[in-house]
Amino acid sequence: MRILLYLHKKGKTKLTTIIQDMPLGQKAVYTALNTLKQLTLLKEETTKEFPFTRKFRLTQKGEKIAEHLAQIEEILKT
């Protein structure tokens, strides 16, 4: 859930930035990203030239779910 909300707020983001910003271990971030990719909630983009970077963004399906999660998070804050 955290990664979905994070990408919903930040948009397309480099893998290294996600790892630095998330309060999770590197392995947990990789596992979560792979799970979200399998669920088609996010898409990975890799550059073809140096420096090689991996960026992640939410799919349309992922955006819909993240919007609902953001609403739930807002309700819980009040």
Image: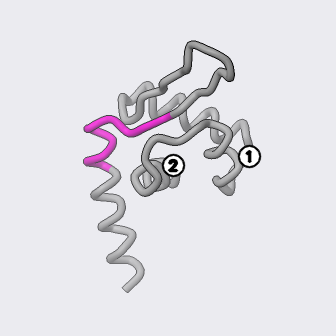
Specify start and end residues of the magenta stretch as a single range: 56-65
Quadrant (top left, top right, bottom left, bottom right) of the C terminus: bottom left
Q: Quadrant of residue 47?
A: top right
Residue assigned mark 1: 25
Measure the C-alpha gap from mark 2 to mark 1: 13 Å
Q: Give the residue drawn at x 47%, y 53%.
A: 10
Q: Nearer the viewer, residue 55 or 71?
A: 55
**Residue 1 seen in this snapshot:** no
SS majority, magenta = helix
Percent from the top left, x then y, of residue 28? 67, 41
Q: Secondary structure at mark 1?
A: loop
Residue assigned mark 2: 3
Q: Nearer the viewer, residue 76 or 23?
A: 23
Percent from the top left, x then y, of residue 17? 64, 45
Identify the amino acid type marked 2.
Answer: Ile
Taking the magenta stretch, the answer to whether it contains residue 62 is yes
Percent from the top left, x then y, of residue 22? 64, 53
